[in-house]
Image: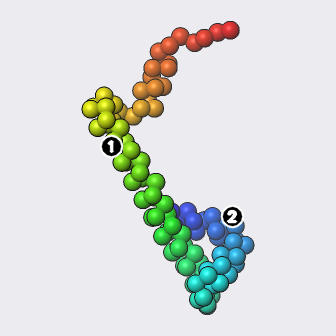
Amino acid sequence: MSLFNYVVIAFMFPEFLEIAAATISAILGMKLSSDIAAFAAILGFTAIFNIIHTAVSIVPAYLLMKSIISFGRGAVEARRIWYVEAVKAASKQSPQRS
């Protein structure tokens, strides 16, 4: 994600670098000496956010899926991708015409 964040910041929103550097300096009380230091700090904090966000998103979903499977005692087939099965079932139905 850091590579993609670099592309977004450097090419799509270059004015964001100054705003983010000022915000980091104000909140943490640290003086960023150059644009490269500001850019490294922004990418570092963004990477930390992405790691935390991934954990907060995946862990509850995993626990929920695990409890659904154990609740149904295997009635839910977790080895198949549900969306693919739903599309296959929908494609077997004849189209409704009005």
Determine the image quadrant of residue 72: top left
Q: Position of residue 22 (x, y in %)?
A: 68, 81
Report the residue that reaches farthest toward the left: 73
Q: Which residue is mark 1?
A: 66
Q: Amino acid at mark 2?
A: Met
Q: Is 45 rendered above or below residue 88?
A: below
Residue at x-position 59% and y-position 89% = 30
SS at circle 2: helix
Q: Amino acid at mark 1?
A: Lys
Q: CA distance from mark 1 to mark 2?
A: 40 Å
Image position of 3 (left or right of 72): right
SS at circle 1: helix
Report the residue that reaches farthest toward the front: 71
Residue at x-position 48% and y-position 70% = 48
Image position of 51 (left or right of 29): left
Q: Mark 1 or mark 2, which has the lower sequence index? A: 2
Q: Position of residue 55 (x, y in %)?
A: 42, 59
Out of 85 and 76, give the one closest to the viewer.
76
- Position of the C terminus by quadrant: top right
Q: Which residue is mark 2?
A: 12
Image position of 9 (left or right of 78): right
Q: Position of residue 8 (x, y in %)?
A: 63, 64
Determine the image quadrant of residue 69: top left
> Of discs 1 and 2, which sits in the foreground?
1
Q: Is residue 77 visible?
A: no
Q: Position of residue 35 (x, y in %)?
A: 63, 83
Q: Is 53 rendered above or below residue 43?
A: above
Residue at x-position 31% and y-position 28% = 75
Report the residue that reaches farthest toward the right: 15
Question: How many other residues sit within 10 Å of disc 1, few (<14), some (14-19) or many (≥20)?
Answer: few
Res. 5 mark = none
Residue at x-position 58% and y-position 68% = 6
